[in-house]
Image (spheres, rainbow, N blue to C red):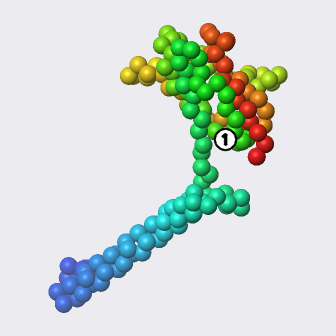
Amino acid sequence: MPRNTFEDAPAMVKLPLAVASFVILAACALAAKTWLAAPVAAQSAETAETAAAPSAAATPAVVARLESEHITIRPTGFEPTEITRPAGRVLLVVNDRSGLDSLDLRLDAGALPRLFEVRVPRDTKGRREWRQLVLLAPGRYVLTEAGHPEWVCRITITAN
């Protein structure tokens, strides 16, 4: 008994099947594109609304804004020498403009153990910039350079 294949079908059947298959695939692709793009648009709208009017009742799905503190080390020490900010996550950004051969940063919190000590390497262009995301609780912190203990940036973290 001979097997019937698509190649054996008459042309009048092949063309409508091909068109129907194409339409179904196009509809699936369009539906998938709409379905995949919808969460991104909603998330962008939520983020824009949150940035325009921050809400204390923000949902965990909304990405919180990350704040940063920029500190520059000059031949005379840290600029600024004091920072006051609310408790929470902060990106510490330290730019070295001191001209030192090596840069060793330390962050201490009173009687607690040292939070970090890091040697900051130069990048491929010879610049030295360091970034560290930290979660700071209310209290007083001191950022220093190991070779220059007189260079101090005092960081005061207040309760929200």
Give residue 130's quadrant in the image: top right
Give residue 132's quadrant in the image: top right
Looking at the image, which is closer to me, 50 or 17? 50
- Label 1 Cα neighbours within 10 Å, binned few <14 / some 14-19 / many ≥20: some
Residue under label 1: 89
In this view of the protein, can residue 96 be seen by the observer?
yes
Quadrant where the N terminus sits is bottom left
Name the residue at 72% across, 42% down.
86
Is 88 on the left-hand or right-hand side of 30? right
**What residue type is disc 1 on?**
Arg
Q: Position of residue 50 (x, y in %)?
A: 60, 60
Give residue 138's quadrant in the image: top right
Name the residue at 38% across, 22% down.
125
Name the residue at 49% across, 20% down.
97
Residue farthest to the right, as pictured: 111
Looking at the image, which is closer to me, 3 or 14? 14
Q: Position of residue 31 (x, y in %)?
A: 42, 75
Name the residue at 70% across, 35% down.
84
Q: Secondary structure at mark 1?
A: strand
